[in-house]
Image (tube, rainbow, N blue to C red):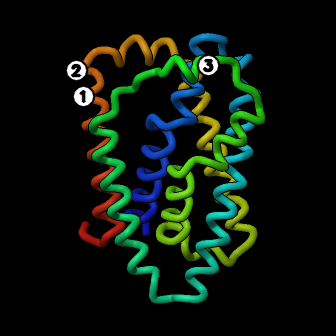
Amino acid sequence: MLTEFAAALGFILVTTFTPGPNNISSAAMGSLYGYRRTLNYMFGITLGFWIVLFVCALASATVLRLIPGVEGVLRYIGTAYILYLAYSILKASYTFDSETSKPLAFVNGFLLQLFNPKLMVYGVTLFTTFFASITDQPVPLFVTVCLLSLTAFCAVTVWASFGTMIKRYLRYPRARLILNIGLSLLLVYTALKLAGLL
């Protein structure tokens, strides 16, 4: 049980804190406009994140109820997705695209979540594997989605607060390589735990 929790926690933290549309855009906004002017955008991200995760949880509960035997299949699909993320992180360049470097509002952050395929796959993976047992329990499900959304807010806060510093240090190939290898290995460990190979 403890190792299963550790695997879930590793997956959540690595997936939430590594580069993606939310983190990169928040870092770019933070480095250009400061943390306070980025807050509305981050609140939009957090609310959109919560709604998408809640929908993913309900959809996962429906699938697991209608086809109980699909959990094993989804576990291996989730494992494959985590390994794909590990490979993607290994190649991450942490490039701050100038197109994301313009003032963005609450609605921009909110809408970004509704069209974020990474978030949708992340949500389905979580609620068909690690949290499959709580999808039919309203209170634990609500608390879990709130905690996951709080984690997402913490991630965009870190990226916005340290946008300039991250941008400065991750220009160096060796620093990127060390970080990417460490994060990728953590995801590989998580995938192996999910598949029952560890």
Along the horizontal axis of the image, is 157 left or right of 73? right
Q: Report the residue marked by disc 3.
A: 29
Q: Give the amino acid type for the residue marked by disc 3 in the picture.
A: Met
Which residue does the image show at 66% across and 55% down from the upper left? 52
Q: N-terminal of the two: label 2 or label 3? A: 3
Q: Report the residue marked by disc 1.
A: 177
Q: Is residue 53 above or below residue 140?
A: above
Q: Determine which of the numbered discs, if any, sits on residue 174 in the image.
A: 2
Q: N-terminal of the two: label 3 or label 1? A: 3
Q: Give the amino acid type for the residue marked by disc 2 in the picture.
A: Arg
Nearer the observer, 170 or 13: 170
Which residue does the image show at 40% across and 65% down from the upper left? 78
Cβ–Cβ under 8 Å for marks 1 and 2: yes
The answer to which quarter of the image holds residue 94 is top left
Which residue does the image show at 55% across and 67% down from the upper left? 127
Between disc 2 and disc 3, the foreground one is 3
Which residue does the image show at 63% across and 67% down from the upper left? 57
